[in-house]
Image: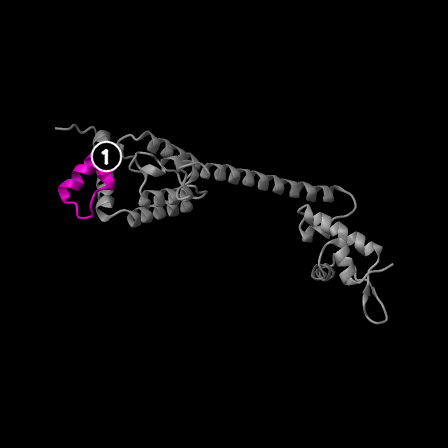
């Protein structure tokens, strides 16, 4: 008994297009043809087609299906590689499910990194946008420290004063707020004193992350707020210089 291309495709649960493609890439031998030119597939073609379908269903790439023999370490190596890739996929999917479970809880929001969902009510739109960017640029450890710091509300009054600062704030107001913020400033830190380590593998990538964070800060906050942060950093650095040189305050 023999089958046409359509018939063998139906038997194998695939498509005519797929069968023809397997011929093109050398995975399936071409069958003999009848005098009228129609292909006639035999049992060994169906067996091979089902083998290909099973292997691809297990995640073996087509390029490696052709390399698989009937035995040997080479075949085992391919299966171990596919298994490792599936394990990584399972971990990724489990992580996604954990995030979805958190987002399904009352009060959660997709507008911020999942771990910050419980703080959404305390954040403004620009704060949320900055956290999303920070989560991409900085390490998970840094973001967790920042989350704990924000959750602890170390200085709500100071936070609100900074957030409500108008763009036309006068010099005296900016300076006073900068002086209040200065004690919380450390090099490479947020206004809350949390040092952020870039999620980077090279110095160049780390510098690019810091530049991007600075650009986001300037885009999301008004010029007065950015000026206050600049002044606070300068005040902090001046204080450190005085301590390092042994200068005493008058």
Q: Quadrant of residue 116?
A: top left
What secondary structure is marked by label 1? helix
- Outermost residue toward the front in this view: 106
Determine the residue positioned at 24% across, 30% down. Answer: 244
- Outermost residue toward the left in this view: 250
Q: Is residue 1 above or below residue 194?
A: below
Residue 200 appears left or right of 248: right
Q: Which residues are magenta?
A: 159-183
- Outermost residue toward the right in this view: 1
Q: Quadrant of residue 22?
A: bottom right
> Which is more toward the observer, 250 or 29?
29
- Is residue 97 in view? yes
Q: Main secondary structure of the magenta part?
A: helix
- Is residue 189 in view? no
**Rendered location of residue 97, percent (x, y):** 52, 39
Determine the residue positioned at 28% across, 37% down. Answer: 191
Q: Is residue 176 above or below residue 41?
A: above
In reply to whether residue 172 is colored magenta, the answer given is yes
- Determine which residue is flagged by label 1: 158
């Amino acid at each position: 008994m023999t089958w046409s291309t359509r018939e063998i495709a139906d038997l194998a649960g695939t498509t005519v297009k797929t069968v023809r493609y397997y011929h093109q890439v050398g995975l399936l031998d071409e069958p003999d043809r009848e005098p009228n030119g129609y292909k006639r597939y035999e049992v060994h073609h169906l067996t091979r087609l089902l083998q290909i379908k099973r292997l691809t269903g297990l995640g073996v790439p087509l390029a490696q299906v052709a390399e698989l023999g009937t035995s040997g370490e080479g075949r085992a190596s391919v299966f171990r590689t596919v298994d490792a890739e599936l394990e990584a996929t399972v971990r990724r999917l489990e992580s996604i499910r954990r995030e979805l479970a958190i987002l399904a809880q009352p009060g959660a929001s997709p507008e911020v990194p999942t771990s910050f969902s419980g703080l959404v009510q305390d954040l403004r739109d620009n704060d949320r946008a900055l956290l999303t960017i920070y989560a991409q640029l900085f390490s998970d450890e840094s973001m967790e420290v920042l989350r704990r710091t924000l959750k602890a509300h170390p200085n709500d009054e100071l936070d609100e004063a900074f957030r409500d600062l108008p763009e036309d704030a006068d010099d005296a107001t900016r300076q006073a707020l900068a002086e209040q913020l200065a004690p919380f400033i450390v090099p490479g830190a947020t206004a809350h004193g949390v040092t952020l380590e870039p999620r980077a593998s090279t110095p160049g990538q780390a510098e690019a992350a810091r530049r991007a964070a600075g650009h986001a800060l300037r885009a999301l906050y008004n010029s007065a707020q950015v000026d206050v942060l600049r002044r606070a950093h300068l005040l902090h650095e001046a204080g450190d210089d005085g301590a390092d040189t042994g200068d005493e305050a008058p």
